[in-house]
Image (cartoon, rainbow, N blue to C red):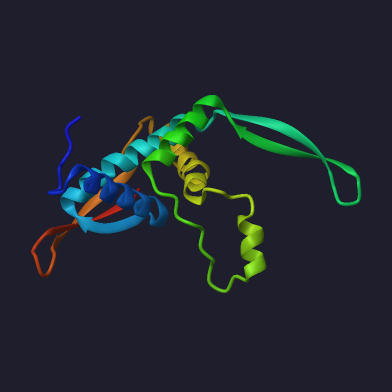
């Protein structure tokens, strides 16, 4: 498939795009040059489509364990199906894994409690937020794709590069 070279060697270009796709999915919008925005849009749409295609591939399982007092308890656990697991691994290869950050005013114990089960926060956000949001949108509009929007902002001051805002729709 043809792609823009962005005046960079392959390894630098791939790292740049991977970094910008990660920032886009984490922050839901970024500002960059227009050529980069179009490439980032392509990659982000592919990542989200992978998650949307496997949104229903989950299995529910019941785990039995014992609490501190010795009472048996049953916990319902949602596991990935084989297709969703494969999509998760592909997505993890395409993006970086930024650490979860504290919310303003959040204490250390509250932060640890909130994030104790989350190993890959961005991947969890892709599957638990974006995939559900866009699968419903695809179902309502009877379409797929078009998860990002690129808006031209004009020339950048300094070097005159065409800037663009890319955001999730």
Q: Is residue 140 visible?
A: no
Can you give x and y, in whole percent of width and height, for residue 115 in the image?
A: 60, 56
- Quadrant where the N terminus sits is top left
Would you place residue 11 above or below residue 107 in this image? above
Q: Quadrant of residue 111?
A: bottom right
Q: Position of residue 46 (x, y in %)?
A: 34, 36
Q: Residue at x 35, y 31 (%)?
A: 143
Quadrant assignment, res 93: top left
Residue drawn at the location 39% of the way across and 50% of the way down: 25
**Frontmost residue, 5 versus 47:** 5
Residue 157 visible:
yes
Residue toward you, 64 or 142: 64
- Decide: is 59 above or below 4: above
**Residue beneath the point at 35% across and 52% down:** 24
Q: Is residue 6 left or right of residue 64?
A: left
Which residue appears farthest toward the top when viewing the image? 82
The residue positioned farthest toward the left in the image shown: 160
Point out residue 142 in the picture as x, y percentages from the top left corner: 38, 30
């Amino acid at each position: 498939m043809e792609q823009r070279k962005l005046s960079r060697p392959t390894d630098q270009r791939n790292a740049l795009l991977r970094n910008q796709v990660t920032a886009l999915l984490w922050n839901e919008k970024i500002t960059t040059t227009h050529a980069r925005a179009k490439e980032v849009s392509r990659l982000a749409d592919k990542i989200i489509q992978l998650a949307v295609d496997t949104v229903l591939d989950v299995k529910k399982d019941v785990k039995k364990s014992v609490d501190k007092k010795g009472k048996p308890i049953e916990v319902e656990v949602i596991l990935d199906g084989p297709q969703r697991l494969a999509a998760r691994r592909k997505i993890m290869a395409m993006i970086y894994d930024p650490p979860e950050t504290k919310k303003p005013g959040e204490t250390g114990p509250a932060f640890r409690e909130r994030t104790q089960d989350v190993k890959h926060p961005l991947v969890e956000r892709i599957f638990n937020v974006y995939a559900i949001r866009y699968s419903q949108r695809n179902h309502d509009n009877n379409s797929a794709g078009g998860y990002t929007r690129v808006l031209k902002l004009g020339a950048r001051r300094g070097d005159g590069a065409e800037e663009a805002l890319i955001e999730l729709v």
